Amino acid sequence: MSSSKFQPDIREALIEHERKVREADRTTVAMAANEVVQRFGSANAEYIKGYTGVDQETGQRLAKGLAGISNSKVNENPVYANQNIRQQAGFSAEVAVTSRDNADAIVKKSRVRTSRTDDLPQYGANHNVVDRVRILDGKVVDGSQAQMKFVGNRDKLLDSIAREKGEFARYRGVLLELPSEQFQGDRSHLLEQAKQLRARAKALGTDSGHSESVKELFEKADLLEKRGSSPSFQPQSAADYCLEQAAQRRANALKAEASGNLQAAQTLNEEAKNYERLAENVRDSGLTTQEAIYYREHPEIATLLDIGRTSHHAGLEGARIGAALGVSISLLSNFFKVAQGEKDLADVFKDVSKDALRAGAVGYATSFTGAAIKGGMQQAQSKYVRQLATTGAPALVMDICVSLGASVKRYVSGEINEAQFLSEVGEKGSGMLSASMMAAVGQIAIPIPIVGAAIGSMIGCTLSSIFYQSALEAARDLERSRTHLNRVRLAEAAARERITLERESLLAFMGREIPQLQKETIQFVGLIGSVSETGVDAIAVAVNHYATLLGKQIQFESQAEFNDFMASDKPLFL
């Protein structure tokens, strides 16, 4: 036989070997990225918890969730409705920023967590000074107490805190968290103030008795807009404003003291100290006013954007891990081939670069998808799904979809037959899931089909899409589709013929054996019913005969043999 006939088989074996190597590399990258998936997935769970207002892991029901806040009542009057939205946006900001802080802490592997005081029994609901605190090992971190204020006029708020008899003097000594544009004092801060002044003016405009107030509000809005739009505009942060006010008061205190008004000087100096402390305590909340309003009006989309952003960061970390691992594996593999004389050194670096890019892409996709799925599983209502989230299953989802998708494509394009397709799917599915699935079974002790359904639901949607796209691509080649159709018809005809043969064989067996077995069973039951008349040895003979019909040989055929066995050291065979 010519050796050329073996070439297709060798080539096919090499292709199959390369395919398995690529799958092994993908699985290796996926499992290497598991720590990233677990960490960023837990971070994503914080956003889901903030949205629903329920921590499924602990069973704690939070005072407020983004979904609940978005359903709050709003005045039917458009002007007052706008005020309601802004007030409620302040609550949404508290929840959203808390979720972000906790997600960030998890990503950075910090044990510190942030909580709204409404969710802590030691503070109770609607605490009048502190909105948020940080907690470490169950204890409030000293100095972390913060009040979050999303108001229209930043400077007025700061003045009402620092002045001697200010309305919000109770906020002295705690951190003050402001919208980002107010903290920075940029143009958007002034324009936002002008916008709110105009809204107030329009609300008062319906009452003829407030014409002067309306005019004054519009004039202030015009001045703010003019200042914010000026090319020479210089931003003034909240801290800078406080320090400027402190300096002015100290200067005025010196004048008052020089004129003999010691009481006024003391008051001014105290206010200066208040402004200076406030400058140290003011913080950027991390959200703008408009972002807070968006959380109030579109909590679902805002939450998905948070998850997407965190998953993207997970993907970047996964890409770095994948690329580094891909380079290591590729270098070892390629240098081995160089040593064997199978590849030139000039080709190694090009191939290593390709492998690094491919592994980096797998690392990104695995980490992005896994982190998003893990976050949802961790806050699922089912405890089984939550426990499954702690395994390697989320990290393997993308790998499974890609690998099974390759088999689907090979099947619909006619490269492999049905038996080969099922063999590949079974091999890949069981091989890649076995480690994480068995870990899950070990933890939760539930039937395997339930665990399989949890993973299957995640894979199903993606795999269905891959199947559709692969089938669509294969259908474009008409000749290949016709050849494949003929092959399927031949397989179908052969299957029908085989089923007919097996059915006839089964019917023949039943017609031959079942009547005899039925007759022997009736005799055996009758003999057992008359045990007192027939004796033990007769019963033993009948049992042995019946067992032989069923394909089983019993060790003892009489009472005497049994007695001899009991007196010996021989083992008992069941």
Image: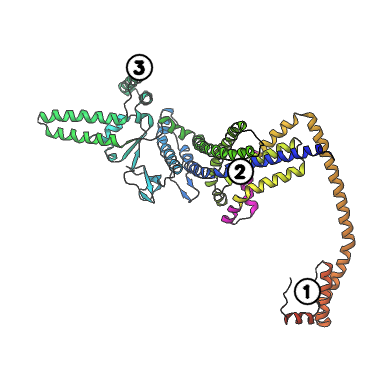
- The 10 Å Cα crowd at callout 3, few under 14, some 14 to 19, many 20 or more, is few
Query: Which quadrant does the N terminus fall into?
Result: top right
Viewer-proximal residue, 327 or 269?
A: 327
Residue 201, visible in the rendered structure: no
Amino acid at dot 3 = Pro
Per the rendered image, the range of residues in magenta is: 438-462
Q: Earlier in the sequence, mark 3 or mark 1?
A: 3
Between the residue at mark 2 and the residue at mark 1, the CA separation in whole angstroms equals: 52 Å
Residue 64 within the magenta-colored segment of the rendering: no
The residue indicated by pointer 1 is 555
User: Which quadrant of the view contains residue 350?
Assistant: top right
| Residue 27: mark | 2
- Which labelled disc corresponds to residue 231? 3
Q: In the orientation shown, which residue stands out farthest toward the left?
A: 260
| Distance CA(mark 3)–CA(mark 2) | 57 Å
Q: Residue flagged by tag 2: what amino acid is it?
A: Thr
Identify the residue at horizontal 30%, vertical 37% (top origin).
281
Q: Nearer the viewer, residue 347 or 361?
A: 347
Task: Note whether 58 is above or below 237 in the view shown.
Answer: below
Q: Quadrant of the C terminus?
A: bottom right
Q: Nearer the viewer, mark 2 or mark 1?
A: 2
Place of residue 247 in the rendered image (x, y in percent of width and height, measured from the top left): 21, 29
Q: Based on the picture, tell me whether residue 452 belongs to the magenta stretch.
A: yes
* In the displayed structure image, the side of residue 245 where residue 534 appears, left or right: right
Chief secondary structure of the magenta span? helix
Amino acid type, mark 1: Gln
| SS category of the residue bearing label 1 | loop
Q: Position of residue 156 (x, y in %)?
A: 29, 30
Disc 3 to disc 1, C-alpha distance: 105 Å
Residue 29 in the image: state x and y as whole percent: 57, 41
